[in-house]
Each structure stands twice: as C-alpha cells, then as structure tokens.
Image: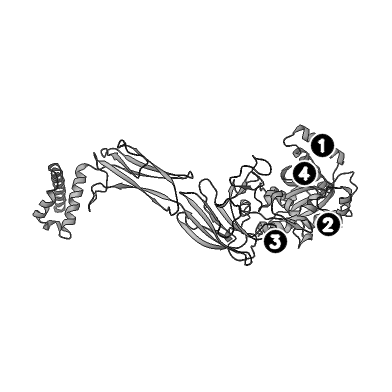
Amino acid sequence: MATQMPWAILLCKYQDDGNDPNLTTIADLYIQYPGAFDNPAAAGDNRTILELYNELFTTAGTGTYNAVAYWDVMSHSNIDVSGSRVFPCTLNMTSAEAASLYQTDLQNDPVNGGFQYQTALFQKAKAALLQQYSIDWKSFYGVAVSFQSPDQGSQGGWYDGGPGVFMDARYVRCNGMMRWGHEMGHGFGLDHSRTNGEPGGPEGPNNPDYTDPWDVMSAEVTSWFPDPNYSKTGPGLNAWNMRSRQWLDETRIFKVPVMNNFSETIDLVPLHRKDLSGYLGADLPGVGTDSHYLVEFRVKENWDSGIPAATVMIHRFEGTIGQFLGTHSYIMKGTNGQKSLGDGDVFEVGTGIYAKIEVLSIDPGNRTASVRLSYSSPTVKIDFLDLYGGTCRIGFPVEGTKSAFRYELSNTNYPHSYQVTWGVTGATPISGQDLHAESFLINTPDPSVLVTVSLTVLFDNGVSISDSYTFHSILEYEAVWTLFVCKLRHRFRPIPWWEWSPDDMQRIANNLSKEELELIQQRTELLLQNIRRLGELRQR
C-alpha cells in the first residue's frame, strides 16, 4: 500500500497584490509582468491561477503530466501525493516589505543569502494557513510556498522544521514537473545527481552537481520535453535515486545470486514501466569503494519523452539510504566514455574484483533491452609445498628444514593486474628471496614456536585480498618415520604389514642414511612399546 505523502501548496500573495487567484488568469499575469514568463504560450493561457495550481498539484489535473502522476510513477507506486491541496493565502506583509527583507538577508549573509528570507516567508505562510483555514501545516508531508507574482528563486529542501519548496507561479506555468519534480525531490530528501569521474559541471569546475541529463535531480540540464499544460516536463528519476528513498520495487530487480564468478544474460523492461512484466533493473556488486551498481533501461516515452533515444544506464550511490540530502547518485561511463549505452556498448570496472555489463541489444518497439552481467570476486589460498616429492608426502613443515609455500588465486576469469607480498611471524624468511614472487621459503623453527605465513594480494584498482597459514612444525624423526611408513605402504599394498618381506624392506632402507635409520629404529621401538602396553592393559 502506498504511503500517503500529501503536500500543502500555499498559493501566496502580498497584501498589496490585487490579483484574485480565482479570477486572474495566467494571460493577465503575462501582461502585468512583461518578460517574467519565458514561454510565450502563457500569453494565451486563460486558466485562472488557482485552476493552474490545482491541475499541477492535485487530482484535478488527472490525465496531464502533473505531480500526482509523476510521483506515483517515480516511486513505483510506493507513495501517494493525491491528497495534496492548494490553499490561496494572503500574507501579513507587502511586496515592498518582502523585498526589503530579502535585501537585508543578502547583505547579512552573501554566501547563503535568501535562505533566511525564505524561512521567514514559510513562517508567515504557515501562520496564514492556520489563521485563514484553521489547518496546521503538519497535517501534510511537505509545504510549498509559491507566490502568484514573480519572487526570489527556486529551491527545495528543509524549511522551518519540515520539507518544503519555494517557487512562484512562473515555474508552475513554464517549468512544470521539470522544475517542480526537482525541487519536490529535494523536499523528499534527494540531492543533485552527478557523473562518476567529473569534478565539475554547469555550476563550476569544483561543483560536480547537475551532470546527469537523464535524471530530474540535475534540473535545467536534463532531457525534458515540451508540454502544452506546463511547458516543460520530465525526465524521470534514476534507479539509485529511487532506491535511496526506498521507492524502487526490489522484487522486480535482478540480483546476482553469488558473490564470486558469475555471468548471465537477462532482459530488462523500462524502469518506469511497472505495468510491464519483467525485470525493471539489475543489481551488480560494486568494485572497490563503489556501492552496488544499478542497471536500468529507459525508453523515449511518457516522462522520458525528452531523452535522445532508448538507452541502458548504470549508476552508483554515495550516502546512506533514507538520509535527507547529502547523498548523490553517480551515472557511470562506458568504456568509450559515454554515459548512455546502446547496442554493443560495454561498461567494465576493476581488475581483481571485476564487474562488466554488456548491452547485447535494445528493442525500443518491444521495450526490451538484453544485457549480459558479469562479475568476478577472486580468492587466494596459501598451500604448503612438500619438498620431499614423489608419491609420499609428509604434509607438515619439518623443524630445521626449509619450508616452501605458494599461493593459488581463484575466480579470476577476467584480465587482472596485481602484486603479492609475503610475510611471516615466528620464523625467518630465506634471505635474498623476492617477497613478491610466486613462492616463499622460510627457515623452519622447532615445534614449540607458532608460525604464521601470510600473503596479501593487491590489485591495481586498490582492492586487496589475503590469506594466512599457521602451524607448529613436526620433529625430524616424525617426518622420517612418516615418509618411511608411507613408502612401505606403497611398496607392499595390499599385503598386511606382518607379511612384509625383509628383503624388500631392506631395499627401501638402503636409500636412508644411518641417522635416518636410527630415527626409524627409535620410532619403531616406541611404537612396539605402545602395542605391548595396550596388550597388557587388555589382559587385565
């Protein structure tokens, strides 16, 4: 069920404004304020001010590109603003008093000038709502203060204790949901959309905002389209901005089932067409410090009628889901530097942990895009190299010997570049060796010392993985005995040990030194003592 989030639209005028929103038309305003309306179509608009506001913000505008329809589609029907109401209000101040207040605010705070002015007008407008309608603004999710005469600026965010938008009638008639979608988006907690890797944008070289033309949170640079009722409309929200508000229908998003090697081809339907069956997007794990990537398909229709062509796009996100402002979506570029991916285009990132998205085909007519998603998450494991060789293995490092180790990387099906670094505690590495080589040798101490061999693999995208191998060595006589018994078992299998030929045993022993034979003799005598002891216990 959709969450009810209605707005109170306070259609304000000053005490000395003689226009009646029930009678004055947009055409009248166009004449009264020459040059204020940047669309000449306003000159022939005979809707009253109140009729225009009701159409854009309430169900009175059903069938048009209005706010009710916009937020239903952009939230995947998770929120409902159809309960919004327009309240014509007269503020307890003149236009001259407002202008003086604005200039004072600019002088006192040149950096943020205008915010205190807007906050003061919010307070006066809310007071007028309570006084003139006996309605508390807190009965609504958010408040829009919008003057029927041209005023100062176009902003959205948090004002006087709640979500708010500050804009006048020019933006209702000439900017529609292109601008109101943006500023109400701020009121819902969204911030400006950006492009990955671009440090600057239309606001200057050090401001990366407003650089995603396919997302309404980039305001004037977006791909809007002409609308006869409100002049400019669209585009929609990207998938990550929708997820950040918990509006994205996650049940319709394809998600990678495993976190190692993965590759699968899927079909997408347009992100804003929840009425169509199929995946509305895809989720791929991020690489490095990136969030997960959301893949979306958009077509040139409805709210996206202004985009150049049907396209696949990828976004990441910075910030906390649900946070109010201070978070940003980032559109990711393909391998050719393009933000919009078409047939045959590719997005790939990473070398160790690796993500790749290939657009196999786009069919605008059938509203489908076929994409292949690939992901690789490597792992590393240290192995002990038994230097004795042959068919028999001791399986443990032996005191007083050189112990060798190597590593094995898994899940690296894609091109990668990396460097390994070996380390050890509890033992000393063999001097002169390369600590970045494929293998690693140490001088093995006696069994009383705990030894840990470690390895770190650093990929060129900054991702690192590691492993360690911890052990106590075994005594030399245990190693010799283990090797001798292994050779005997292989030589005489499947003959029982008590039937082994002394001559064959002698041939195996000929390969052993006098010291090794003495160690075997000691071990054998110890084994026989234990067997005799077990026999004595059984006779009791």
Please report whichever mark, 1 or 4, sits nearer to the chain's N-terminal start.
Answer: 1
Q: Disc 3 or disc 1, which is closer to the eye?
A: 3
The quarter of the displayed image where residue 260 is located: bottom left
Residue at 86% of width from left, 52% of height from top?
21
Whether tag 4 and tag 3 are in contact, CB under 8 A, the answer is no
Q: Amino acid at mark 3?
A: Asn
Q: Secondary structure at mark 3?
A: helix
Q: CA distance from mark 2 to mark 4?
A: 23 Å
Report the side of 81 relative to 525 (left or right): right
Crowding at dot 3, Cα within 10 Å, few <14 / some 14-19 / many 20+, comes out as: some
Q: CA distance from mark 3 to mark 1?
A: 42 Å
Q: Amino acid at mark 2?
A: Glu
- Which residue is tagged 4? 153
**Disc ID at residue 51:** 2
Q: Disc 2 or disc 4, which is closer to the eye?
A: 4
Crowding at dot 4, Cα within 10 Å, few <14 / some 14-19 / many 20+, comes out as: few
Q: Amino acid at mark 4?
A: Gly
Q: Quadrant of the N terminus?
A: bottom right
- Where 188 falls versus 448 (above or below)? below
- Where 524 falls versus 2 (above or below)? above
Please report whichever mark, 1 or 2, sits nearer to the chain's N-terminal start.
Answer: 2
Residue farthest toward the left in the current orientation of the protein? 503
Please report whichever mark, 2 or 4, sits nearer to the chain's N-terminal start.
Answer: 2
Q: Position of residue 465 (x, y in %)?
A: 43, 45
Q: CA distance from mark 1 to mark 4?
A: 14 Å
Please report whichever mark, 4 or 3, sits nearer to the chain's N-terminal start.
Answer: 4
Residue at 82% of width from left, 36% of height from top?
101
Please report whichever mark, 3 or 2, sits nearer to the chain's N-terminal start.
Answer: 2
- Which residue is tagged 1? 101
**Disc ID at residue 236:** none
**Disc ID at residue 302:** 3
Q: Amino acid at mark 1?
A: Leu
